[in-house]
Amino acid sequence: MPEPLAATGRCFQFEFETPFRPPLALIGVRPETATVLVDTDTFAIRFGPWRLTTTRANLRDARIVGPFRWWRAIGPRLSLVDRGVTFGTSTRSGVCVRFAIPVPALLPGRWLAHPGATVTVADPEGLVASLNR
């Protein structure tokens, strides 16, 4: 269940499948370090040491995707097909968000910008509804 952030925003927690908790914790990704924040102006992902932040105006669309194979979904991932980034903690489902202007996340600076991001939050329907308002 998402936690209220403020009157204008929400915090969505990642869904952590039990088998993946120990390896994710080794890279700094734990329930307390993995969230998606949505407010009236900002969309932000925190995934352990990785961050992605952009404006709501930069969002093109959001949709539910999955299920996934574990080797394509768990951890921070780069798609070699479209340069999209995945921040994954579950194989069940996720939310794919596409951006009008690609956004950096895996590497510092603008060395690698991603046209989309997939996150495996516990409430994918709620996140999509929040983003598509």
Image (cartoon, grey):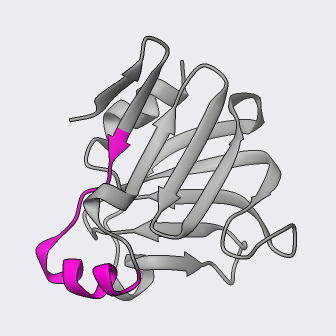
Residue at figure coordinates x 47%, y 22% from the top left: 9
Q: Quadrant of residue 36?
A: top left
Q: Quadrant of residue 4?
A: top left
Residue at figure coordinates x 77%, y 72% from the top left: 108
How many marks on residues?
0
* x and y percentages locating residue 15 in the rendered image: 24, 57
Q: Is residue 65 visible?
A: no
Q: Quadrant of residue 54?
A: top right
Residue 12 left/right relative to 61? left
Q: Is residue 77 or residue 80 the one in the foreground?
A: 77
Q: Is residue 37 visible?
A: yes
The single residue placed furthest to the top in the displayed view is: 7
Q: Quadrant of the N terminus?
A: top left
Q: Quadrant of the C terminus?
A: top right
Q: Is residue 13 magenta?
A: yes
Q: Which residues are magenta?
A: 12-27
* x and y percentages locating residue 105 in the rendered image: 68, 65
Q: Is residue 23 magenta?
A: yes
The single residue placed furthest to the left in the displayed view is: 18
Q: Is residue 88 or residue 67 the one in the foreground?
A: 88
Residue 4 left/right relative to 57? left
Q: Is residue 84 or residue 30 the one in the foreground?
A: 30
* x and y percentages locating residue 52 in the rendered image: 64, 55
Residue at figure coordinates x 49%, y 43% from the top left: 63
* x and y percentages locating residue 6 in the rendered image: 42, 18
Question: Compared with residue 35, is residue 24 higher up or lower down, i.e. above or below?
Answer: below
Residue at figure coordinates x 21%, y 77% from the top left: 21
Question: Compared with residue 6, is residue 88 higher up or lower down, i.e. above or below?
Answer: below
